Amino acid sequence: MGLALGQGGGRLALGTKTAVCEFRDVPAVAGRLEPSGTHDACYLQRATHFTGNVQIHEMAFDTGGQLWFVNTRFSCLATIDLEASFVPRWRPPFITELEPSDRCHLNGLAMVNGRVRYVTALGESNEPQGWRANKIRGGILIDADSGQIVCRGLSMPHSPRWHDGRLWLCESGSGTIGTVDLSTGRYEPVAAAPGFTRGLDFAGDLAFIGLSQVRESAVFSGIPITERLAPEERTCGVCVVDLRRGETIALLKFDSGVQEIFAVSVLLRQFPDLINDDERLLEDSFVVPTECLADVAATVRMTSS
């Protein structure tokens, strides 16, 4: 579910069903990949931390390099500690205790100046699965500093982001992205997309948005996008929106095999790879600290720029 890029893109974390996996870019290994001389990044797995099934959602690194993640099942934000499954660091004021019952479906996490600042949830509920009762318009945006709810009435909000001096988010239930006026608490849609919008990142005036096909289930019944788009019109993929015009200018569409996208991050590389299934390459790729290279035989030493 979750995906986080560290400063400069050299660090990558993935949230899975039961663990957080961390990868590091090893440029020297990129030079060993085929086609030769084409890759400009190669991510190798460095660590796996087992959290248990906490229904990880969004993840982000803070300025100190600490990884934060949304622990949806326990309705809190958490970090990693080697002695524990997770460390609860913050929860909405209306959540009275830790319990693996997905009380409000906390899901989105926005950093401002490298600090956790805004989160999204699908409902203001302190009961197990209580958010489901008003899933159509019960979504909220919370200021993590004050604990105050700054925007209500959202349809399944996800992916809050601070960009260019404004707070953006996906109103997934309507299939839009837009901004929230923090003084009035009003959500203003900027663009509509052909799918359930979830996952958001920016590059200048371009927004990269994840799209999912809405599953035919009770969870997604009755939300606005099901009225706007017929089932065959709902797309899975990534669209690019020009924020100056509010128009989609590019679309990567998955016609089969994939039905949902959760996280989207812009990686400024041309031809990266992530290696987790090439056992031979993993067996023979060793990374030591730079200060130790002098002790490594010249016959096996590789350095990266």
Image: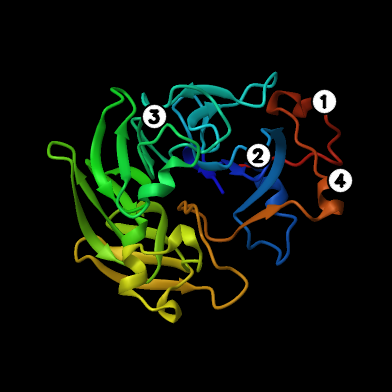
**Considering depth in this image, is 176 or 114 the residue closer to the camera?**
176
**Considering depth in this image, is 297 or 289 the residue closer to the camera?**
289
> In this rendering, does residue 66 appear at all?
no
Determine the secondary structure under disc 4: helix
Alpha carbon separation for disc pair 2 and 3: 23 Å
In front: label 4 or label 3: 3
Determine the secondary structure under disc 1: helix
Counting residues from the start of the chain, the first of labels 2 and 3 encountered is: 2
Q: Quadrant of residue 284?
A: top right
Alpha carbon separation for disc pair 2 and 1: 42 Å
- The answer to whether the residues at label 2 and label 4 have Cβ atoms under 8 Å apart is no
The amino acid marked with disc number 3 is: Val
Across and down, in percent, residue 22 comes to 65, 38
The amino acid marked with disc number 1 is: Asp
Q: Is residue 234 above or below residue 144?
A: below
Across and down, in percent, residue 110 comes to 37, 38
Instruction: Name the residue at 31% across, 59% down.
Output: 206
Q: On the image, numbered disc 4 is attached to which residue?
A: 283
Q: On the image, numbered disc 2 is attached to which residue?
A: 53
Counting residues from the start of the chain, the first of labels 1 and 3 encountered is: 3
For the rendered model, the colour scheme is rainbow
Q: Outermost residue, bottom direction?
A: 232
Instruction: Name the residue at 45% across, 73% down.
Output: 235
Alpha carbon separation for disc pair 4 and 3: 38 Å
Q: On the image, numbered disc 3 is attached to which residue?
A: 116
Q: On the image, numbered disc 1 is attached to which residue?
A: 295
